[in-house]
Image (cartoon, rainbow, N blue to C red):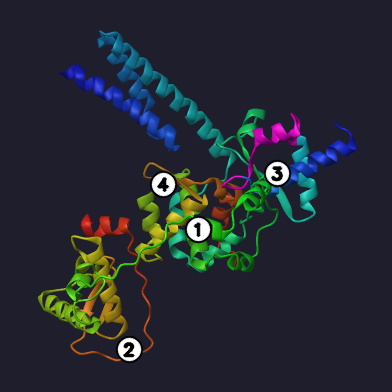
Amino acid sequence: MRFKVKRELVERIIGTCERVLRRGLDPFVVDVEKYVSYLKDFLMQSKSTEDLALDLEALEALSRVVEFQGRWVIDKSSKLFFDPLIIELKVKSLSLNDLAHILCHVFHPIASLRIISRRGFEEAVKYWLNLPPLRDRWGRLPQPVFKVESASIEDLIRSRLALKGSFSEMLEEFWGRIKDLSSRGVIYYWDFLKSDSFEDSILKAYMISFLASYGYVKLDFDPKVEDYIIIPYESKVEVSGSNSIAISISYGEWLRRVKGGG
Amino acid sequence: MEGKAELKSKIERAAQLLLIQRHRRPGVKGWELKRALGRRYLEVIKLLDDELSKFGLKVKVVFMEDVSEPKAEDYDKAIFMVTFRHPAKITDVLTSGWSIDELGALAACIAFINSRGGSVRRKDVEEVLAEKLPRWRVETILDRFIRMGYLEVKDDYLALGWRSKAEVDADLLSLGLVSYGSTT
């Protein structure tokens, strides 16, 4: 059992070395001396050719890390060294405007042109010359058959082509729901959006957007949880000089924040 | 070297290859230049660089790996592109589609990643940017920088991308940051 654990550790050494080399991380985080002595110990206990091969693989990975350490030192010594903490402090303390100006002092944009190649142009001409007139292409399509059928308003609602009730009724219903939830505690924007389907979440976001724009609710940012609090007004207020808040909801974002609960 | 006319034609060809974007990203690989211009393509590129200097442009070589003393094979694998010889004016950059917030965020990302050995966890970069930008904007901006080639993703880490290496002198940026305030 003890032997198996050691084999796993050797595999872990290989993994660590590969991660450092692949990501270009500081190679001095790998304690080469300790690992070499461990491999020596492992070699003494090895019985199978698989173990010997694994030991060899780990040793090879460590030697590549040592080689990388050499290159790292040469590279670092040829460059200016800046304390990461000072840089972080500067980045955090300066405004984006100041940072932008500093960047522009060392910014050399790439100059390049996009044009069509001669071959591309020849292909395009060939395509255009061979393209049949529009009337010929349309002539190949079957004649559309129109059939008149009746549909009830319930069918349209089911097909999501019509609303159940008016839009203002829907807004009122959402407003009422928010007021009700608010009386029980704070409502966070992303919590409110939680729903079983992406469509329902988008509908809720759309309704909040309307309610906020027309003075039924307001949104306050809570920096502690980095989310907006939905605060309903008791009665509609006049909105003047309001700010726009753009909240992007992609399907991926919805999965992560609403469905995933993160 | 070659005759004057042949050399002139090679310089013209090199200028066309470097200035006209053929692939999804600008720039031409060293081996492509070697195929088009011959074995001594680096000499042609040097002459083109001298010509471009008259227009405030230069040939920039971006190596795939960090190399202190590049060899011929490193140049073959490198990307060659034309950049501004002198830093761009901020007004020109702003009128080319950048916002001041995005430029500031790019400066923060490059300086932060460069100071930490060239590779930082995405989460840590997000934390730094979130000091000044709303969280949703941080993610959008980082994704944009990755798409544009300023940053590249290695597992859950962010590193400087080919475009940052081509357009920004990261060490000078750090120097600018450190000395900012003491000189202004």
Compared with residue A215, is residue B159 higher up or lower down, i.e. above or below? above
* Circle number at residue B35: none
Q: Position of residue B145 (x, y in %)?
A: 48, 54
Q: Position of residue A260 (x, y in %)?
A: 22, 54
As shown in the figure, which amino acid type bears the numbered disc 3? Answer: Leu
- Using a 10 Å C-alpha cutoff, classify the residue at mark 4 as few (fewer than 14 neighbours), some (14 to 19) or many (20 or more): many
The residue beneath circle 2 is A239
Identified at 86% across, 32% down, the residue is B2
Which secondary structure, mark 4? strand
Compared with residue A56, is residue A216 higher up or lower down, i.e. above or below? below
Chain of the residue where label 3 is placed in the rendered structure? B
Which secondary structure, mark 3? helix
The residue beneath circle 1 is A139
- Using a 10 Å C-alpha cutoff, classify the residue at mark 3 as few (fewer than 14 neighbours), some (14 to 19) or many (20 or more): many
As shown in the figure, which amino acid type bears the numbered disc 4? Answer: Val
The residue beneath circle 3 is B17
The reply to whether the magenta stretch includes residue B12 is: no
Compared with residue A217, is residue B75 higher up or lower down, i.e. above or below? above
Q: Is residue A122 visible?
A: yes
Chain of the residue where label 1 is placed in the rendered structure? A
As shown in the figure, which amino acid type bears the numbered disc 1? Answer: Gly
